[in-house]
Amino acid sequence: MTTTSLAKENTDRAEASRIMGLWRRLPVLLRAVVAGLFVFMVLQTGNTMIFLANMSTTPDIPWMVPVGLAYLWAAFQFFNGRWGPKSTAIARRESMRARRLGRREWVAALGAVFPVMIFFITVTMISYRLVTVPSEELPMPELPWWSTYSALLMISIVAGVSEEAGFRGYMQAPLEKRYDPFVAIVVASAFFWVAHLNHANGVPRLGALFIMGASLGLLAWCARSILPAIIAHAAADTILFMGSVSSLGPDYIWEPVPLKESGIDGFFWIVVAIVLTSGIVSAVMLRRLAKITHSAMTT
């Protein structure tokens, strides 16, 4: 290495160190919000571009799935501390909080995933009865069934990974350390809702989105990992998206009539009962998960 190139490398390192020093001087709240939104947007936007390119070129061939999964994997690995500057690897891994769970932890986590998922799905169903939610169609042309379901599955996976990495990982994890889990979950859930304001139904779904974000935030905190939350989020979106498109259930599930038009009916009370039951079961299973996780991390 020549003297000139060595001097340039030292200058670059000094500049990077200065920028990182300025970054660390910012309040934790600001750093967490900015970092979380950045990670979310990188993971989400890259796959959105792949999706739009597929739809505008060869929509009958869902090549978005392998290409999108490869992009998602590579970006996730980077934000989880792989590759890139070694000086930030530990910080990236801690912020992502994609800790691998042991067998006993996974059993407890999966036991919590199902009731948590049922809880916020049924909360969404109730919210659609309480307020008028504008319908919103995905930007997809007429597609054969294999492309339609491939696209919806990919959208669900991307939403689960990008939103959990950004909001329950990079945003919530640092706030838990600086403040406490309650503050961290509230802040992350609020910005989770803000991120959906680009949808026509974003504002009417404030309550449902906030509760969904809080449920996933609590799941991530109890597991000390975003991995179970990714599963719950992606699975819930898959059920909601594919169910809506295929209309496998009755119309009152996928096209609910607001209560102000229909009045309170029997199905509404059934959903309320499911919300209450799944909420209680979720609380029990999350408490069990938190105990098992704490035990595993302290032994």
Image (tube, grey):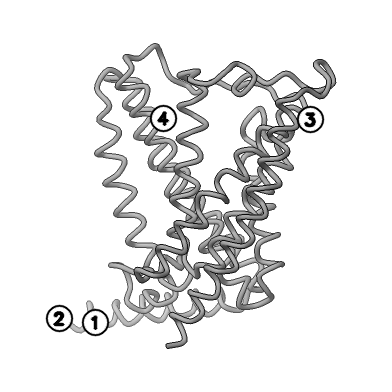
Say left or right for 4 vs 278. Answer: left
User: Mark 4 and mark 2: span between their CA atoms?
Assistant: 51 Å
Residue density around tag 2, few if under 14, some if 14–19, many if 20 or more, within 10 Å: few
Residue indicated by mark 3: 130
Residue density around tag 3, few if under 14, some if 14–19, many if 20 or more, within 10 Å: some
User: Mark 3 and mark 1: span between their CA atoms?
Assistant: 65 Å
In the image, residue 41 sits, relative to residue 199, either above or below, namely: below
Percent across and percent down for residue 14 are 41, 81
Image quarter of the C terminus: bottom left
Residue indicated by mark 4: 152
User: Mark 3 and mark 4: span between their CA atoms?
Assistant: 26 Å
Residue at point 41%, 65% (across, down): 98
User: Mark 3 and mark 2: span between their CA atoms?
Assistant: 68 Å
Report the label total: 4
In the image, residue 1 sits, relative to residue 222, either above or below, namely: below
Q: Earlier in the sequence, mark 3 or mark 2?
A: 2
Say left or right for 139 vs 67. Answer: right
User: Mark 1 and mark 2: span between their CA atoms?
Assistant: 6 Å
Q: Amino acid at mark 4?
A: Leu
Residue indicated by mark 2: 1
